[in-house]
Amino acid sequence: MFQNRITLSPQDILEKEFKIDTRGYRLKEVDQFLDVIIGDYEEFAKIIKENEKEKEDLLEQIMNLKQEVRNLKMSIEIAQSGNNEHKEVTNVDIMKRLAQLEKIVYGREEKEEE
């Protein structure tokens, strides 16, 4: 999923070998490798932040949808529970609730399109 964004694999880091000079490893080579590792860590941080934002957005959508389901279930129960005399009143109530839900749903879609 994120393979094209990350340069090194854990195996690449583990198997990396540096050439040795008279005083130890070649500093330029080590610094370049560390720069790549730092770049990957920064990319991992971005990925985590993006995923957290997406998770928050999805949780908010779930909560909104659950509320809509509760409202619709309540409307159905009201419609089914009344007798003939109350059905006229509940039908009007149901129509009002549906109109409110349409405003919420279509209002949200208009905002998303902007």
Image (cartoon, grey):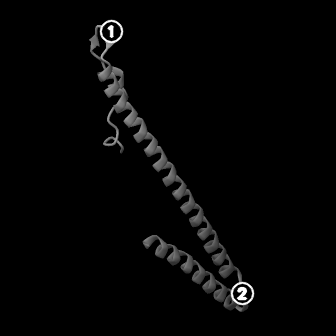
* Residues under numbered marks 1 and 2 in contact, where contact means CB atoms less than 8 Å apart: no
Please tell me how crowded label 1 is: few (under 14), some (14-19), or many (20+) other residues with Cα within 10 Å: few
- Callout 2: few (<14), some (14-19), or many (20+) C-alpha neighbours within 10 Å? few
Return the mark for residue 13.
none
Residue 77 in the image, given as x and y percentages of width and height:
67, 76
User: In whole angstroms, how far apart are the C-alphas of marks 1 and 2?
Assistant: 94 Å
| Closer to us: 95 or 32 | 32
Frontmost residue, 12 versus 91: 12
The kind of secondary structure element at disc 1 is loop
Residue sitting at 64 percent across and 73 percent down? 71
Q: Is residue 60 above or below residue 25?
A: below
Amino acid on which disc 1 is placed: Arg
Answer with mark 1 or mark 2, whichever residue precedes in sequence: 1
- Identify the amino acid type marked 2: Asn
Taking 61 as reference, is 71 above or below it? below
Q: In the rendered image, which residue does mark 1 sit on?
A: 23
Image quadrant in which the C terminus is located: bottom left
Q: In which quadrant is the N terminus drawn? A: top left
| Residue 83, numbered circle | 2
Name the spot of residue 102 as percent of width and height, x first: 54, 80
As drawn, which residue projects farthest toward the top? Answer: 22
Please indicate, yes or no, whether residue 51 appears anywhere in the rendered image. yes
What is the secondary structure assignment of the residue under circle 2?
loop
Residue at (34, 38) in percent of width and height: 6
